[in-house]
Structures are given as structure tokens and as C-alpha cells.
Image (spheres, helix red, strand yellow):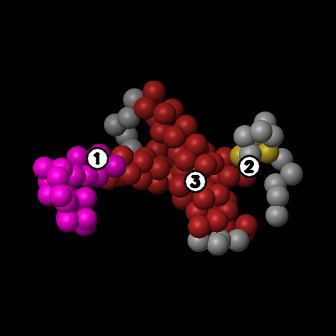
């Protein structure tokens, strides 16, 4: 089922997903009081963008039907201020521990030689 209205056509983003992410990000701001105006704007932009681009991935990966799309977008917008730092933290941990992880799983000594 395709959305007849998309943002700019070439972006492939749905208005309904953008709106869900935007509203979710706005709701998330009601739980955070210590952010500056610029940080609040950034959080809303981040939540909206996360919802717009990640919702289709989630729907495809878990084979979720179109009725859940707006809810997924809303939840991603709502939680993106917490999800994105967690994803960045995991990626930093993987970067910092890559040699140890490879050594453990592929029987390579941590010095780099076999």
C-alpha cells in the first residue's frame, strides 16, 4: 500500500510517518526540562528524522502491516533521544573492543598474529 502524498517525491518519506515522529518527539520534550531551546529543536528534528527513516526498516524487518506504521513512527520519535545515544554508545564500545572480540571468536591473539 503506497502513500499518495510523499515529501518531495524523491525522498520517499511519508507525511504520516513524519507527523507521527514529530508528535512523538514533541511529547518526549514534556519529560525533559533541562534542554536549551537549540537542544529542544535538535531533539525534535532528530526524533522526526529517526521515525521517517527507521519506521520502514522496522516494518520490513518484522513484517509489520501498514496499520502500525503511524504508531511505530510515534514511538520512534518519542524514544529517539534515548535510543540514539544508546546506539552510539554500543558502536563506540564495539570500536574500542573490536580486537578483543575478534580474538575471542576467531582464535586470534590480541597482538594481531595467529
Q: How many marks?
A: 3
Q: Look at the numbered disc 1 and give the secondary structure of its residue.
A: helix
Q: Which mark is drawn over residue 18?
A: none
Location of mark 2 (residue) = 14
Residue 23 left/right relative to 100: right
What quarter of the picture does the N terminus occupy? bottom right
Indicate yes or no whether the magenta region holds residue 57: no
Q: Nearer the viewer, residue 91 or 21?
A: 91
Indicate yes or no whether the magenta region holds residue 96: yes
The answer to whether one can see residue 82 in this image is no
User: Closer to the N terminus: mark 1 or mark 3?
Assistant: 3
3D distance between C-alphas at marks 2 and 1: 34 Å
Residue 82 left/right relative to 46: left
Location of mark 3 (residue) = 54
**Eyeballing the image, is 75 above or below 27?**
below
Name the residue rendered at 41%, 53% in the picture.
Answer: 83
Q: Look at the numbered disc 2 and give the secondary structure of its residue.
A: strand
Disc 3: CA contacts within 10 A as few (<14), some (14-19) or many (>=20): some
Name the residue rendered at 54%, 59% in the picture.
Answer: 75
Q: Nearer the viewer, residue 31 or 86?
A: 86
User: For the residues carrying marks 2 and 1, which lies nearer the camera in this image?
Assistant: 1
Name the residue rendered at 63%, 48% in the picture.
Answer: 52
Q: Which mark is drawn over residue 95?
A: 1
- Helix, strand or loop for the magenta stretch, by majority: helix
Residue 13 left/right relative to 74: right
What are the residue bounds of the magenta stretch?
91-114
Q: Residue furthest right?
A: 4
Name the residue rendered at 83%, 47% in the picture.
Answer: 5
User: For the residues carrying marks 2 and 3, which lies nearer the camera in this image?
Assistant: 3
What quarter of the picture does the C terminus occupy? bottom left
User: Closer to the N terminus: mark 2 or mark 3?
Assistant: 2
Amino acid at each position: 500500500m503506497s502513500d499518495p502524498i510523499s515529501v518531495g517525491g524523491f525522498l520517499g518519506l511519508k507525511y504520516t510517518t513524519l507527523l507521527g515522529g514529530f508528535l512523538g518527539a514533541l511529547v518526549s520534550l514534556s519529560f525533559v526540562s533541562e534542554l536549551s531551546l537549540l537542544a529542544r529543536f535538535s531533539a525534535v528534528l532528530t526524533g522526526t528524522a529517526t521515525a521517517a527513516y527507521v519506521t520502514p526498516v522496522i516494518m520490513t524487518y518484522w513484517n509489520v502491516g501498514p496499520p502500525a506504521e503511524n504508531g511505530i513512527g510515534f514511538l520512534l520519535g518519542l524514544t529517539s533521544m534515548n535510543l540514539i545515544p544508546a546506539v552510539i554508545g554500543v558502536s563506540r564500545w564495539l570500536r574500542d573492543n573490536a580486537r578483543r572480540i575478534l580474538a575471542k571468536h576467531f582464535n586470534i591473539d590480541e597482538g594481531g598474529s595467529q
